[in-house]
Amino acid sequence: MFKSHQQFKMKSLKKTRSKKLIIAGSFANDINKLKREFWLNSVEARTYFEEIHVLVNGRVNVDIGSFKQAYFPGWLWHTKFNWSRFFCGAIYFLILLLQSPKFIYEVVALEYKTLPFSLNWHPVTALKLSKTFITCVCGLGLVFRTFIRLDLSAQDTVVVWSEHVTGMRLLKRKVRRSGARLILSEYGELPGTMFICDRGMFHESWPLLFKEKFSALPVSIDEVGEMKKHIHNIVNECISSKVGQYDANSNLEAINLPKGKPVIYVNGVQAHASGLLPRSSKFSHEYSPYFGSNYEMLKYFANLAKKNDWIIIFKDHPNTCNYFPGQEICDGEWGEHVKILGNIDIYKIFTLADLTVSLGSKTVYLSLLNQVPVYLMGPYSINSDDLSCGLYTGGMSEEAIISAVEAAQNHGVDVEGLTVYLTRMMKYFYYSMDDDSNSLFGRGRQQFWKDFLDYMKGGRSFISAKVKVME
């Protein structure tokens, strides 16, 4: 009798739960205007979801219409202190410590890596670290309260933007434990686009996981021609997702490169938000099998450059320069074979480089679009077998790297293969951050919501393409 009563209560609870869509990310300021319009101007979403919540990673409120809005920290230590949050956070910290000690260690370690001061044993530093820990605990309290209020269940869907920042790591963990559906989103590698995938980002996305099926999807000659024009426009207009974030005073005038020597651009990734940190995580070793930091990668290639008489140019990620002051790699210790550049427009660098060396980064695509070959130091959404030339792998093998430098100078980039590959990605994976009428192949925000709702109703295995797979 008691069991039947409990089953009845559970069924009633299931029926009365609202079907929620939760969108979490940074939507504040002008830089996120297109992202806001893409996600928060949806009439279609209301036809399927009964509640829509927006968790904003920013202190600045934004107009999100009638959606329910709450502040949700990207980095925990950005949270303001109050005693109520602190006590809630302390309880949640203990829960996480008991349930997942390695996970909470990685969260705290990553938080400390973002701090704008060096970690040492000075008393002032100790005081700053203590204050940071307290605000991190307050951040945990805010996150804990949000989870209680949202009351996630298996019929809810959560979209996470920037999955590797600490707040989003906590949210992903909660979503997976609740049984809710997790969707990951990020700017696409092709400027002006984004992707939305339930499998993972970049090398974990469905076109890579189901590569044979993806590669068989048809593209027409006319579509390839449209993509060729689109690429030409991107390169001619120097378009990238970081436009407006470069230092207008940085230039190449002070860079005096000797003639006749191979020039290799070593690309600095944003270590905090890419998943490279903390190094103790499993993902970090998948993403970067050989190096735990930009510094380690640059040091390795600086030694190779000295040995082989190459020139290395290095530039940190714009977000490192703008949001993590003091953590950029500095000039002075590298010798005559290495040039450290400021926060300069990436397009200016491609006029100098014979080869780009990088971990998974949107710079890989920009380099290829500018016909500068790439040597990949880890997995990414494009592989060396996608092009006949211009994209190389081989890890830390000096022989493979020398071979890539020679091939880069002699063969360039397989432009036709790249164009076909990007045509397929645009037609079946990316969405333009604009209306359908202004988007390549009509894949703008209206098309996304149609596809998304079809996916939610079981009409397709992947959001971005009408494809079904058996798993």
Image (tube, helix red, strand yellow):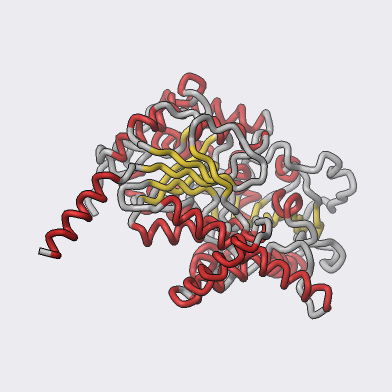
59 to 395, vertically: above or below:
above
**Left or right side of 48 for 204:** right
Q: Residue pushed farthest left?
A: 1
Give the camera-side residue of 323 and 419: 323
Residue 159: in sight, yes or no? yes
Location of the C terminus by quadrant is bottom left
Give the camera-side residue of 200 and 157: 157
Indicate the position of residue 426 as horizontal and vertical percent values: 45, 35
Give the camera-side residue of 27 and 97: 97
Q: How many marks?
A: 0
- For image coordinates 48% across by 45% down, the residue present is 185
Q: Residue pushed farthest bottom?
A: 121
**Left or right side of 12 for 240:** right
**Left or right side of 375 for 386:** left
**Left or right side of 317 for 74:** left
Q: Quadrant of residue 166?
A: bottom right
74 to 134, vertically: above or below:
above
Q: Residue pushed farthest right?
A: 254
